[in-house]
Image: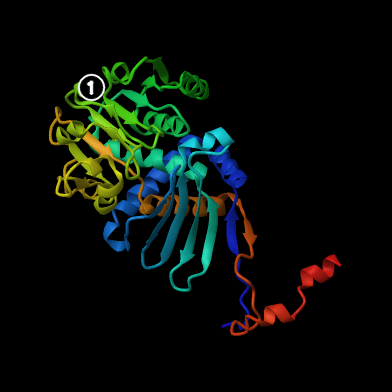
Amino acid sequence: MPSHHHFSTRYLSAPDVIDMVQRKGVEACLRGVADYLHADFLRWGAFDKSARVASHSRDGVIELMPIADDRTYAFKYVNGHPKNTRWGLSTVMAFGVLADVATGAPLLLSELTLTTALRTAAMSAVAARAMARPGSRTMALIGNGAQSEFQALAFHHLLGIDTLRLFDTDPAATAKLQANLQGTGLRTVVCTSTAEAARGADIVTTVTADKTNATILTPDMLAPGMHINAVGGDCPGKTELHADVLRQAQVFVEYAPQTRIEGDIQQLPADFAVTELWEVLAGQHTGRASDAAVTVFDSVGFALEDFSALRFLRDTATELGIGQPIELIPELSDPKNLFGLLRTRNPLLRAAA
C-alpha cells in the first residue's frame, strides 16, 4: 500500500449538470434515470432505509434524505419554500453526496435541483408504467410550475402520452409550460378548472406547490380506469387529494413509514392499506386489479430515488468527462497528524505571495 494516497471528490456544479443534460438530451436522461430507479427498486431489501429528517418552519421545510447499501452511502439536502419565487429563489433547491461505505470518503458532490426534477418525473413514469392502463394517451397536468415540463416529457417519452390537458391557478405558468413544450410533439389543451382538465384524462398528475391541505382532486372527477400521479403533497399539512379519492382507489407508495407522515395518506388512519411500489416492480403485487380500478401513486420522494439519480450522474459524468476534482477533505502526509496541517505553511498561499 502506498503510504500517501491523494484523494479528491468529484464535483458537479449546476452548469455541469445542465451541460450533461444538453449533451445527452432530456429524453435520454429521463430514460437513463428511470432505468437506474427500476434496477435499484428491485434491490429494495439491500438498502438501509429510514424516513427523511425534516425541519419545519413557518414558510417551508428543510430535509435530509439518507440511504445506503453495503457499498455506497447517499444523502440529499433539499428544501421546499413556496414563497421563494418572490425573492428570485427556487421553491425547491437541493444538492447531494455519494460516499464510499468502506472508508466514508465522499466520492461525489453534486447539484440536485435540476436532477431532482428529472428523477421525480422519471419515478412518476416508472410507477405509471406499472399502474396506468396500457394505451393511456391523455394526461391532465394540474400545476404548471417548475416540475411540470419534466413530468410532461417523462410521460410523453416513457408512456406515449400525446395530449396534455393543463390547468394552473396562474395562467402565466400555463403559458410558460406551453412555450417550453413547443416542438416536442405534445398537444396541449388549456382548461379553466381541475375538473375540466381531468375530463377524459387517462392519467391525472397533480404537482402543486402551496403548503396547505388542499383538495385539488375530488371524487366527482374520478373516472373508471384513471391513474392519479399525486406529486405535490409531500410534507405534513400539504395534501392535494380529497380523502375519499384515496378510499376509492388502490394506493401505491414509495416507503410507507415516510408516506404515512408526508403523503396524501396522512389524512387516513395509520392502518389504511397501501402497497409499496417495489412490490409491484418485483412482481410480488399487481399494479392494477382491473381495467376499471382507480390507481393512485402517492409520491413524496424517497432517498432511494436520489441514490439512483446520483449513480446516474456519477456514471454519466465519467462517460462524458464532466465535473472537476475538489479537495473537500484535507490531504495529509500523516493521517494521524491533523494539527500538522496548521503548522506547515500552505504551499498554495506561498505561491500566491
Q: Relative to residue 214, is residue 62 depicted above or below? A: below
Dividing the picture into quadrants, the one containing residue 216 is top left
State whether residue 224 appears in this view.
Answer: yes
Pick the front one: 11 or 53: 53
- In the rendered view, does 274 fall on the left or right side of 4? left
Residue that protrudes farthest toward the right in the picture: 353
Identify the image's colour scheme: rainbow, by chain, secondary structure or one colour.
rainbow
In the image, what residue occupies the spot 45% across and 44% down? 116
Residue type, mark 1 in image: Met
State whether residue 32 appears in this view.
Answer: no
- In the rendered view, does 225 fall on the left or right side of 100? left
Q: Relative to residue 225, is residue 58 depicted above or below? A: below
Q: Relative to residue 141, is residue 13 depicted above or below? A: below
Q: Dot 1: within a 10 Å radius of its alpha carbon, few (fewer than 14), some, or many (20 or more) residues?
A: some
Dividing the picture into quadrants, the one containing residue 194 is top left
In the image, what residue occupies the spot 22% across and 30% down? 133
Q: Quadrant of the C terminus?
A: bottom right
Where residue 84 appears, x then y in whole percent? 52, 38
Residue at the spot of label 1: 221
Pick the front one: 195 or 157: 195
Where residue 288 appears, x then y in whole percent? 17, 36
Q: Quadrant of the N terminus?
A: bottom right
In the image, what residue occupies the spot 40% across and 15% down? 190
Residue that protrudes farthest toward the front in the picture: 58
What secondary structure is found at the residue carrying circle 1?
Answer: helix
Q: How many marks?
A: 1
Where residue 142 appears, x then y in whole percent? 36, 26
- In the rendered view, does 147 fall on the left or right side of 139? right
Dividing the picture into quadrants, the one containing residue 76 is bottom left
Where residue 93 appears, x then y in whole percent? 51, 45
In the image, what residue occupies the spot 28% across and 19% down? 195
